Amino acid sequence: MNFKYWGGANSSAPIFAYLGAEGDLDYEMPVIGFLTNNAYQFKALLVYIEHRYYGESVPFGSREEALRNTSIRGYFNSAQALADYAEVVIYIKKQLLAENSPIIVVGASYGGILASWFRLKYPHVALGALASSAPILYFDDITPQNGYYSIVTKDFRNHGLKSIDQLNNAYELKYYLEVGYTMVVQFDDPPSYPVTMICSGIDGAPEGTDVLSRIFAGVIALRGNMSCYSINAAGFSIQTVGDTNSPDLSVETVEGWAWQRCSEMVMPIGCGENDTMFPPVPFDLTTFIHYCTTSYGVLPRPHWVTTTYYGGHVGGNIIFSKRLRDPYSIGGVLKNISQTIVAIPTVNVPVKSTDPEWLVMPRKAEVDIIESWISQYNADLHAMKK
């Protein structure tokens, strides 16, 4: 919790609650800019809540023990996480005597999905939600299976990668390169711009260079020339030369998300024949069912998300912000659904102090909308007290 700019309960100052996703919250906090950048303007209390079974928030012992125990791992799901968030913010408001302080929930990626679902499931708790890069439509075949990989392919092409079609030949490196290339697109932020670095390495190789040597040149451009490169469960690390803060997937994220995909979050992501830069690997539900039953003894529920969170719900006060170069943008809300469920897409990267106006304006639009929610809330609160 951060009280630095909070206006206090007596002034009904708002509470901004960040909803943790599939990872350690301590890792996420340094890169969460929206809350700290706008806390002063809103005089907001900042609250960061970690998702159960990630980071330090593991009940019933360790996460490894929880995933092995069929009774315990059943509590590792989004519905339970949403209930946790609700319990925490309600408790905080009670302890601070801040019953009239409106709550705005914020999340990114899976956390963005949770923020939008929180507003749908707990509209009496949260006044509104800012859901960033939330692929809430990547379920139940609403989004084309190859959408994610199509965005990755498009981004590499837009960066001038000339050898893109040749990458299909490197089958022995398929898994690590697939995850590595998708991750650099997903986190292609300044100052390093890893996609540009990889493309310059691949296309900068001398004419006649074979495929694997070009691929390695891209790795060198990104990571530097080393005698040994670490390979983890998430493919090659996307950490760039001299940059110790580049995103990388932890083991807990990979393992935890594997369970969540099998038990509830069935995203049918795949790619077909010659429709992306990657070898064809279509999503096959039969194969996925076999993996989940073998690994966890559970049957995937491909319709569970749409039935549980979308069926019959009428929402409002949700902002879907989306960077169109993010591969998950294809599964997000890209157009306004109503006057109170709005989409704010951006073309490039997250806002920095040196960003041009065309990039700063979407963030300003988000702030203006949240300001309007809080102003209307305060007006309604004042009218009730008369």
Image (spheres, rainbow, N blue to C red):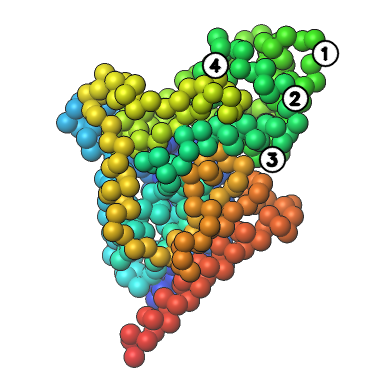
Report how far apart the C-alphas of labels 4 and 1 lie in the structure.
23 Å
Q: Amino acid at mark 2?
A: Lys
Question: Residue at coordinates 47% horizontally, 61% vertically from top-left?
Answer: 337
From the top left corner, tell me how far across and down residue 193 is, in percent.
69, 35
From the top left corner, tell me how far across and down residue 129 is, in percent.
43, 59
Mark drawn on residue 174: 4
- Badge 1, how many Cα within 10 Å: few under 14, some, many 20+? few
For the residue labelled by badge 3, is the local secondary structure a helix, a strand or a loop? loop
> Which is more N-terminal, label 2 or label 1?
2
* Viewer-closest of 117 and 247: 117
Report how far apart the C-alphas of labels 1 and 2 lie in the structure.
12 Å
Question: Residue at coordinates 67% horizontally, 58% vertically from top-left?
Answer: 360
Residues at discs 4 and 1 in contact (Cβ within 8 Å) = no
Q: Amino acid at mark 1?
A: Glu
**Which residue was labeled with disc 1?**
207
Mark drawn on residue 190: 3
> Which is more N-terminal, label 1 or label 4?
4
> Which is more N-terminal, label 2 or label 3?
2
Question: Residue at coordinates 53% horizontally, 57% vertically from top-left?
Answer: 335
Compared to residue 14, the image places residue 377 above or below, namely below
Mark drawn on residue 162: 2
- Badge 2, how many Cα within 10 Å: few under 14, some, many 20+? some
* Viewer-closest of 373 and 33: 373
Question: Where the C terminus falls, by quadrant?
Answer: bottom left
Compared to residue 338, the image places residue 345 above or below, namely above
- Depth check, mark 3 against mark 4: the one in front is 4
